[in-house]
Image (cartoon, helix red, strand yellow):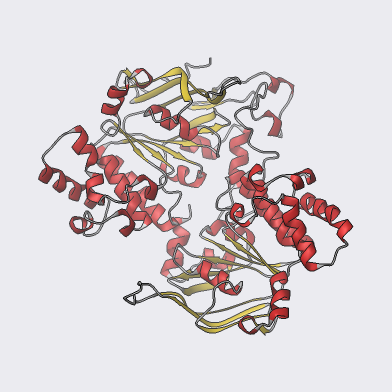
Amino acid sequence: MLVAARNLRKTFRSGGLFRRGAGVLALDDVSFSLAEGESLGVVGESGSGKSTLLRTILRLTPYDAGSVTFDGAEIAAMDRGALRRFRQRVQPVFQNPYSTFNPRFSVGASIALGFELLGNVDKADIPGEVARLLDDVGLDPDLASALPHQLSGGQRQRAAIARALAVKPDLLLLDEPTSALDVSVQAQVLNLFKDLQGRYAFSLMLVTHDLPVVTFMCDNVLVMKSGAIVERGETGTLVRDPESDYTRKLVSSAV
Amino acid sequence: MAEGATARDGGGAAPLLEVVGLRIELERRAEAPVPIARDVSLRVEEGEIVGLIGESGSGKTMTAKSLLGLLPERIRVVAGRAMFRSRDLFALTPPQMREVRGAEIALIPQDALHALNPVQVVGRQVGEPVEVHARRPGPEIRELVVRLLERVHIPNPRARSADYPHQFSGGMQQRALTAMALSMEPPLILADEPTTALDVTIQAEIIALIRDLRAQTGTSFLFISHDLGLVSSLCDRIYVMYAGEIVESGVREEIFDRPRHPYTRALMGAAPRLLGNPERLSTIPGRIPQPSEEIAGCRFRVRCPLAEARCAEPPPLREAARGHDARCWLA
C-alpha cells in the first residue's frame, strides 16, 4: 500500500482564551488505504473532514491519534531526510493555485524550484525541462516568463500541475482542483490529469464535493460526513447502488 | 440588429419582461469602448422560470445587473430597451429605479455572506425592503419577517431573526437573502448563481424552494447560472450566452435534447456525468475570447469544429425549430 491510514482522529479545539469549547471532531476513526496506481476520490460536503484528511496525509495538520504510513513509513515519525523525500514524492494541487504561487516569481522560476530542490537535472538543462513540462500540461512554453497574475484561472491550474510534476511525485493530492474553473476549462484539466497519469504513472487522491468529477476520475471513492467515512467502494457500484442514506442523498442531489 | 424573434408563442399577453437589442459597453480612457453584451434579446413570461447560462465572461451577470441599474462604474447600457410592465427599465431615472428595485424586481445575489451586513441582525435586513418601500410600523414588519423566514424553512424563525449573519450557515444565509427578495412579493426575481457556493444537498433545497415559490405565488425568475445540470432541472426556457451574445434559446427539452449550436453541444459534452462517462470529456479548443477581441463573423468560429467559409459573416439569431432559436449558419 502506498498510503495506509488507521483509526485517524483529529479534534479542532474551539473557544477562546478563557473558556474551552467542546471542539469539532474533524476526523473520527478514519481508516483507508490507497494502492499504487490507484485513483481514490473523497467526497463530502463542507465540514465533512475531507480537506482535513488530505492535509493530514500531507503532514500539514497533525493528528491526535491513529497512524498514517506512506510506503510503509509512519509520516509523523519521519526524520528530516525522510521528510524531504516524502515532500518530493507527495505533491498537492489546491483549488486556488494563485495563492500557492509566489506572485513575484515567474511561472517558470516557480516550476524550476522543483528541479533545483531535487538536483536531478543539470542547471543548464532546467529551462529546457521547464519548457517541456509546460508543453506537457498544454501551456505555451513562452509562458515560463509570465507572472502568475498574467495567467487565466485554467492556465494557472495547469502551471500548478506542471510544478507538482517537476519533482516526479508518486502521489498527487488534489483538493477541489477544478471547482473554480468553468465547465469547458474543467473538462480540459480533468482530461489532462488522466493523460498525465498514463504518462507519469502517479497515484491520485482527489477531494471534492462534486460527485460526477469523482466518477469520471476515480476507481474508488470514500464518502465522508461529520469526520467519518460513511461509505466506500468502487465508484460505479457506489453511485448505482448507494447503501447509506447520506450517499443516496448526495447521488440524488447531483443533477 | 436582429430582433423580432421574440413575441412568437406568447399567446397575446405582453411578456412580464422583454429585453430587446441590449448592448452593454465598458468605457476606456484612450481606447474604443469594449462591448460586454451585444444585441441581447430575451423575455420572461408571467410565472416562468427562465435560465440564462454561460461561462465566465459571457456577459450573463452584467445583463442581469443592467436590468436593475446596478452596473459598475464605466460599464453602461448604450443601446436597447427592457420593457417591464410597459415601462423601459433603461429609461428610468435613479429615483424611479429605486422604486422598482426590491419592490417589483428583486435580486438574489451570488455570494450570500458578502451580500449581508455583518453588523446588523438578519431579521432587520430581511425586513429592509418593506421598511424602505412600504413604510409599515415596526411590529408589523417584525411579524412579516418571521413569516418570511418560516417560508424559506429557517427553523425557529422568531429567535433566528435576531441572529447575526455569521451565526447562519451558508445555506441559511442564502435562504435569508431569498426571504429578503420575496419580502415585497415582486413579480420578478433575478437570481444570480444563488447556489454556486453551496453544498449539493443545500443546493437541492434552494431549487425546491424556488419551485414552490413559483407554484404558490406565480413569481417569475430569471435564473443565471453556469451549471447546465441545474438549469436543466429547474428552468422552463433557457438562453445560452457566449462571448457577450445569446447563441441559442428555447424551451428546456429543445435545448437539452436537441441542442443546435455547436457551443451548447460542446458545453454539454464537457460536463462529467454521474454514470456513463466517456474515457475523455469532450473539450472546446482554445479559450473564451476577451470582450475586447474583435472576431469577424461568428464569435465562436475560431473554436468551432464545424466552422466553414460563411461563418466569417455574422450569423443572425434565427429560428432553427419551433420555439428554438440558434445563432449559427449550420443550425
Tell me what residue is drawn at x 64 percent, y 50 percent.
Answer: A103
Q: Is residue B84 left or right of residue A161?
A: left
- The percent coordinates of residue B208 (x first, y second) are 35, 49
- Residue A215 in sight here: yes
**Where residue B110 sits: x, y (%)?**
42, 44
Tell me if residue B243 comes above or below residue A13 in the rendering.
above
- Front residue of this view, candidates B310 and A161: A161
Give the number of marks: 0
Question: Can residue B280 be spotted in the picture?
Answer: no
**Residue at 42% across, 48% down:** B195
Image location (x, y in percent) of residue B53:
50, 37
Give A113 or B218, whichever is nearer the viewer: A113
Figure check: B219 above or below B11: below
In front of the other: B13 or A27: A27
- Please name whichever residue, B45 or B108, is drawn nearer the observer in this view of the structure: B108
Task: Please state the horizontal and vertical placement of residue A225, each as a whole percent of the image.
Answer: 44, 70
A83 lies left or right of B20? right
Quarter of the image with the C terminus of chain B in it? top right
